[in-house]
Image: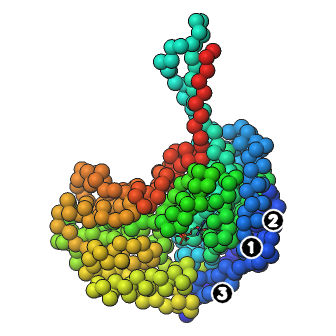
Amino acid sequence: NLSIPQPGPAATKFLEKGIYSNLVNGEWLSCQSGETFDTLDPATGEVIGKLQRSGAEDVDKAVHAARNAFADGRWSKITPMERSQMLWKIAGLLEANIDELAELETLDQGKALYVGRWAEIPGAVNQFRYFAGLATKIEGATIPTSINYQPEGKEVFAYTQKEPVGVVGAIVPWNSPLVLTAMKLAPALAAGCTIVLKPAENTSLTAVRLVELMQEAGLPDGVINLVTGFGHEAGAALAEHKHVDKIAFTGSTQTGRAIMNAAQGNLKRITLELGGKSPVIIMPDADIDAAIQGAANAIFFNGGQVCIAGSRLYCHGSIMDKVAEGIAAIGGQIKLGHGLDPETQMGPLVSKEHSAKVAAYIADGKSAGASILSGGETGGPNQSFVEPTVITDVTPDMSIVREEIFGPVVVVTPFDDTDEIIAAANDSDYALAAGVWTEGLSNGMRMAGRLKAGTVWVNGHAMYDASLPIGGMKQSGWGRDSGQAALENYLELKTVCAII
Ligand code: NAD
């Protein structure tokens, strides 16, 4: 019995449109085939909108629009200050429409409203503000050389300059749609690139609203283009298009491999933000209450559909039972419901298909001999809710320990000493993030150095900021989003060396 409050007037007005178009060179277009597909409220399974099922021809049009917009310099050749001002304006418009965007995200993705309203949409605003600041700070260097064969009376003068990479294809997933989109678009725009955005098929609504707001801000036509559709159709066409210079991708490791293959034709640049199976380590000297709450948040936030979710929990043997039971108790008290219900702490997962996948992992763990300490059930009108689940008695070879489940499921393992726990934590194909809880900060920092992960948190989890690079080692990806490192993804470095 879900209580489903109505969204506010702005989101209602947006939803009344019912059918959403692609944006190509400033024009809202239907796809060439005329086919649409449904986007659903995952809590109920009800259709909330129809999107263009774009194919290769639609992608081609959008890429050409982006190419022309790049070539004539309407964005790349304006002053950095003008680009910065535009990014500030986009940030302001996002912020002014924050309630609407959070409601749309909840309806489309399922997440509890507070996740979008207080974390993700403000996070998207911050991305645009942070990169607005960097747009005016793209600098090269003058470089002294030892070249000594210039003619008498002449000198060698060498410097580097940075140039936008060109046309960027941005392909994003469904778990945190708007903020992950902002992580690509803001640095790409700051660098002077033009973009074709392909949002995830089941969560495209906030991407449509975002590009509307970018138009309202006055971003020149063709600088941002939107094509909706499926990964194997629109996504694949974008990844292999010969006039796309770079793909900025966030999604699964499996799709990351497909993107790599598709990108080889024109050797386009790629950055890949992929999956994770992040360890959270609780040392015996940790502030146990803080660690229990932190480890629970690390896995239950957004229903565990977070690339950096703390899905492998390792506790020192002396505190294992207390921690596991503490997290199980927190999980048991989490209020599941429709994301728009203000009482809701955890919404459904993104789809009934995804919930079934998570349920299959739990079943697989059980049949391999693991114990379900709490949760484990799936339900709701659309079979899309999964209870916060804590699993013990696991072994390192189990699929629930090795594979990314992408749901509110944590596996808990005891350990004895630091060397053992570092080895266990690093025993993964993934290396996106890790967390250590300890009051011995020196030891915590030394452990951070030994953990194979793109980000390590000490006494916290999922602390992210537009200024902090985030991304993976090993099969969690290539390159970084956020921070100054992200801007470099959208720039080419040119060396100029002259005899003067
Ligand atoms: P996914 O790989 O299935 O899809 C991601 C995007 O790729 C979607 O837009 C999809 O349409 C598109 N796509 C699918 N097949 C494609 C193809 N052959 N060619 C081009 N595009 C294609 O991922 P998902 O299930 O939507 O998202 C969940 C995954 O994203 C998880 O693995 C999660 O860890 C990862 N993720 C990583 C980060 C990070 O920063 N590292 C952040 C969030 C999510």
**Which callout, 2 or 1, points to the residue nearer the camera?**
1
Residue shown at the point (56%, 54%) measured from the top left: 270
The residue carrying pointer 1 sits among few (fewer than 14), some (14 to 19) or many (20 or more) residues within 10 Å by Cα, namely many
Residue shown at the point (73%, 70%) measured from the top left: 54
Distance from label 2 to label 3 (Cα)? Answer: 25 Å
Quadrant hosting residue 38 = bottom right
Q: Secondary structure at mark 3?
A: loop
x, y (%) of residue 67?
Answer: 74, 50
Q: Earlier in the sequence, mark 1 or mark 3?
A: 3
Q: Nearer the viewer, residue 412 or 426?
A: 426
**Which callout, 2 or 3, points to the residue nearer the camera?**
2
x, y (%) of residue 201?
Answer: 64, 73
Distance from label 1 to label 3 (Cα)? Answer: 18 Å
Residue shown at the point (53%, 89%) measured from the top left: 383
Q: Going by the image, does 360 lie left or right of 295?
A: right
Quadrant hosting residue 473 = bottom left
Location of mark 3 (residue): 46
Q: Going by the image, does 494 lie left or right of 25?
A: left
The disc labelled 2 sits on which kind of residue?
Trp
The disc labelled 3 sits on which kind of residue?
Glu
Would you say the residues marked 1 and 3 are in contact, meaning their CB atoms lie under 8 Å apart?
A: no
Q: Nearer the viewer, residue 103 or 192?
A: 192
Quadrant of image for the N terminus: bottom right
Residue 28, disc? 2
Q: Earlier in the sequence, mark 2 or mark 1?
A: 2
Quadrant of image for the C terminus: top right
Q: Nearer the viewer, residue 4 or 141?
A: 141
Distance from label 2 to label 1 (Cα)? Answer: 11 Å
x, y (%) of residue 331?
Answer: 38, 80
Residue shown at the point (50%, 46%) measured from the top left: 485
Q: Secondary structure at mark 2?
A: strand
